[in-house]
Amino acid sequence: MSVLIAPSMLSSDFARLADELAAVERAGADWIHLDVMDGHFVPNITFGPPVIKAMRKYSKLVFDVHLMIAPADPYLEAFADAGADIISVHAEAGVHLDRSLQAIRALGKKAGVVLNPSTPETVLEYVLDRIDLILLMTVNPGFGGQAFIPAVVEKVARVKKMIGDRPIHIEIDGGVTPETAPLVTRAGADVLVAGSAVFKGGKEDAYRANIAAIRAAVA
Ligand SMILES: O=C(CO)[C@H](O)[C@H](O)COP(=O)(O)O
Ligand SMILES: [Fe+2]
C-alpha cells in the first residue's frame, strides 16, 4: 500500500505561503493539508476561504481542508468555491453529520469525517457510504507540534476493519514523525499529515529530507 504525505501548512511560514507551497511540492508532498480553526471549536484561529483561494493559485496538489469550525455547514460552499478538493468536518462539531456529508458531495467535493482522540469510531457506522476519507486525530486539535497519542493506534485498526473494501482513505493527523508513522500505517492508515516534522529546518532541502525520512520509515 502506498502512503501519501500531506504536509500541514499550519507549520509553514504564513508570511510566505506561496513560496512554502512551491517548496513543499518540490520536496515531495502528495497533498496539502489546510487547518481551518475558528477559536470556538478549537482554542486557536488560523485562516478561512479567502486565504485558501489565494493559495489555490500557487498549487495544483490536492487541497485537503480540515475544518475545525462549528458550525461547519454554513461555510461549506465557501470552502468548495475557494478550491478545496477534500472537505472534512469533525463528527463532534455538529449534530447532523449525515447532512453535512451530503452537502459536501453535492458541492462536487470529496467528503471526510474527523474524529478527536476520545471520539469512538462507532459514529462512522451509518455514514460509511457517504465518505471518501476518515481523519483520525492523534492529538487534540488546535495546535501543531503536540505529542502523538498512542491509544489511537488501536482505533486505526478498528476503523480499517470497519471500512472493509470501501475505497475510503484513513488519514492520521497529529504528532506524525518517522518514529510514530509506522505505528499507524501498520494499523491501516494510508495518508499521513505532518506539520512540524515536515517544516522543521525552514528550507526546501530540509523539507525534502524530512518527507523522505517519513517515507523511509513506512516503506
Ligand atoms: O490539525 C492539526 C492540529 O489541530 C494539524 O494538522 C496537526 O497538528 C499537524 O501538526 P503536527 O504534525 O505538528 O502535529
Ligand atoms: Fe489538521
Image (tube, helix red, strand yellow):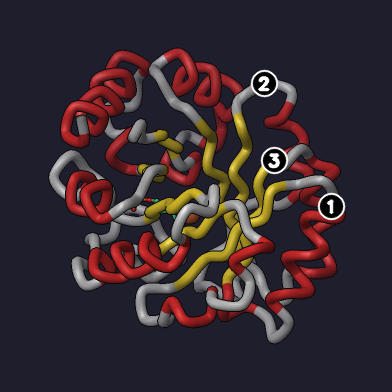
Q: Is residue 20 left or right of residue 196?
A: right
**How many dots with numbers?**
3
Q: Is residue 19 above or below residue 160?
A: above
Between the C-alphas of marks 3 and 1, the distance is 12 Å
Q: Which residue is mark 2?
A: 58
Give above or below for 173 relative to 14. Answer: below
State the residue position of label 1: 78
Circle 3 residue: 85
Badge 2 marks a residue whose secondary structure is loop
> Which residue is depicted at the point 43% across and 81% down?
119
Q: CA distance from mark 2 to mark 1?
A: 19 Å
Q: Residue furthest left?
A: 179
Q: Residue at x 57, y 64 (%)?
A: 113
Badge 1: residue crowd in 10 Å (few <14, some 14–19, many ≥20) = some
Q: Earlier in the sequence, mark 2 or mark 1?
A: 2
Residue 207: image x %, image y %? 33, 23
In the displayed structure, 92 sits above or below 176; it is below
x%, y% of residue 176?
28, 48
Q: Amino acid at mark 1?
A: Ala
Q: Are marks 3 and 1 in contact (CB under 8 Å)?
A: no
Name the residue at 52% across, 42% down: 33
Q: Is residue 158 above or below residue 14?
A: below
* Label 3, residues with CA under 10 Å away: few <14, some 14-19, many ≥20: some
Q: Earlier in the sequence, mark 2 or mark 3?
A: 2
Amino acid at circle 3: Asp
SS of the residue under disc 1: helix
The answer, for residue 37, to whether it is visible in the render is: no
Q: Mark 3 or 1 closer to N-term? A: 1
The answer to whether one can see residue 219 in this image is yes
